[in-house]
Amino acid sequence: MTRGDHRLRIAVGRVLVVAMLLLGWEVLGGGLGLGLKVVDPVFFSRPSLIATNLYHGLVKGEFTSDFLFTMESAMSGLVLGMVSGIVMGFVFAYSKWVNQLFDPIMIAFNSLPRPALGPVLVLIFGLGIMSKIILSWSIVFFVVFYNTYIGVLSVDPDLIRVTRVMGGTKPQIFVHVIMPSVFSWVFAALRISVAFALVGAVVGEFVGSTKGLGYQMEAARGLLNSDRVYAVLIILMTIGALLTEGSKMVERRLLRWRPPSPSL
Amino acid sequence: MTAEDLPREKIVLRGVSARYAPRPQDKTQSGGVEVLRDVNLTVRAGEFVSIVGPSGCGKSTILNVIAGLWSSNDGALAGEIAVHHNTPPRPLGYVLQKDTLFPWKTLLQNVSFGLQLQGAPREARHERAHEWIARVGLTGFENHFPYQLSGGMRQRANIIRVLAYDPDVVLMDEPLGALDAHTRMLVQQEILDLWEGSKKTVLFVTHDLEEAILLGTRVVLMTRRPASIRSSHAIDLAYPRSIMDLKLAPQFRAIYEELWKQFCESLK
């Protein structure tokens, strides 16, 4: 059996598994005119109803503004989280003072389950986009912060020594040795950061919002419109998958100097 | 021959002693570790001096001291250390055993890095890097990253990265220690050829006496820690040398035997 054959079999197998699961769901949910109804479609819906709802929603553009709202909060949180995380990571690594003074606060905030900040943020910043951006930021920040901090501490001292002997000045050492080393840590965490940014945005919308995919889901749940709840879930799943794949590509491009790892 | 006729002194160490500061977590070494005791060494322009000594004796410390990498945090350092540069002064070359190529730079970027630090324009430094890469047979690998190169290729790159910015003094700390025997011999020959073509001043640290004799114009034997210079031997083997032929040559065997006895003494 050649490699190509093997891969084709896997691909076909995967499609079959998903098709079986969807078919099972459809039948047990009372679909295909079999009238089985083992699970109540009011709660569980079923693939055909979800697909119809999704299709009509997309055609009528019912998701567009909510999609944009969620993406704006998530991406703003991501960018702010990365920039501030990198800056603070460097400050912590370079200033013993700041480090010792703020370490307990950092640990306390990082230990806090971030979604619990949602109600507080809505209380302070209202139902608008700001509370979502900040929740998203608060999750991304710590991931990037700790990666930057560890990145600075784990720079290979021999590379610094060699650069110094070669006549490298402090700024040159920073640009050529420390920054690339740190960015390799930060970009290795890009995938997680992107996923977390989305989590922050959606949770923020659950807590209190007038817009966004999380809000739309929550509103549909209130109306017992389970088809719409699942339709939004599918959209979120798709966004998540696309963002993850996208960040994998960025990672591969930026970290192409690393030996390929067997991980995901 | 009088002192004035000799090539001028490039590296001078007089009465150099060094003691590592005690590490706070290590209570057994309250006074720290004395690594160097009264080291006196003069290396003249164009010499290839091999330093041999028992492992852990402080050979690397000598190079660090010369390279200016000893900081007051490391411990106490006494004595006179001078490196007389050409004018205009150029940075030293320092090759470590572990290859210290930047993993995120390609071979070409690594080799031209020293010139980049000195502000050489892109075309000029790349041109020079290409020449060096060709010299050690790495043409075609310019855009490879270090992880894509074999150990021998990486160590060649490590060496030419230093030679590419044309330092007049090159320090090498067991640069071939991590290579297999065959690759090691090839790179030894390359180092010899590169040195013969350049007449740079080289200080080469190794724990391998054979390597020290094959490469050096002079071999310096160290004592155990705290290290000082035990003896210095001019190696009377004509250049250009061929490693493969020399290993079997009677003159080489004779020198080796004589120094081996002394080397064994220093291990006791």
Image: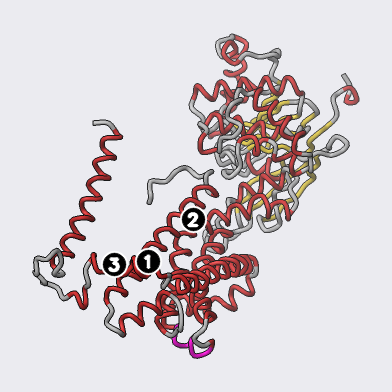
Asked whether the viewer can see residue B124, the reply is yes
Give left or right: position of A22 versus B33.
left
- The residue sitting at the bottom extreme is A123
Q: Position of residue A255 (x, y in %)?
A: 53, 48
Disc 1 sits on a residue from what chain? A
Give the extent of the magenta segment.
Answer: A118-124
Q: Position of residue B266 (x, y in %)?
A: 58, 33
Which part of the image, by quadrant, shows the N terminus of chain B? top right
Q: Secondary structure at mark 2?
A: helix
Foreground of the two, B137 or B185: B137
Which residue is drawn at the image coordinates 53% and 65% (left, top)? A144
Q: Amino acid at mark 1?
A: Ile
Q: With respect to residue B170, does A126 lie above or below?
A: below
Which residue is drawn at the image coordinates 68% and 53% (left, top)? A175
Distance of label 3 from label 2 (alpha carbons): 39 Å
Badge 1: residue crowd in 10 Å (few <14, some 14–19, many ≥20): some
Distance of label 2 from label 1 (alpha carbons): 26 Å
Disc sitting over residue A52 in the figure:
3
From the image, state whether disc 3 or disc 2 is nearer to you: 3
Q: Position of residue B260 (x, y in %)?
A: 57, 23
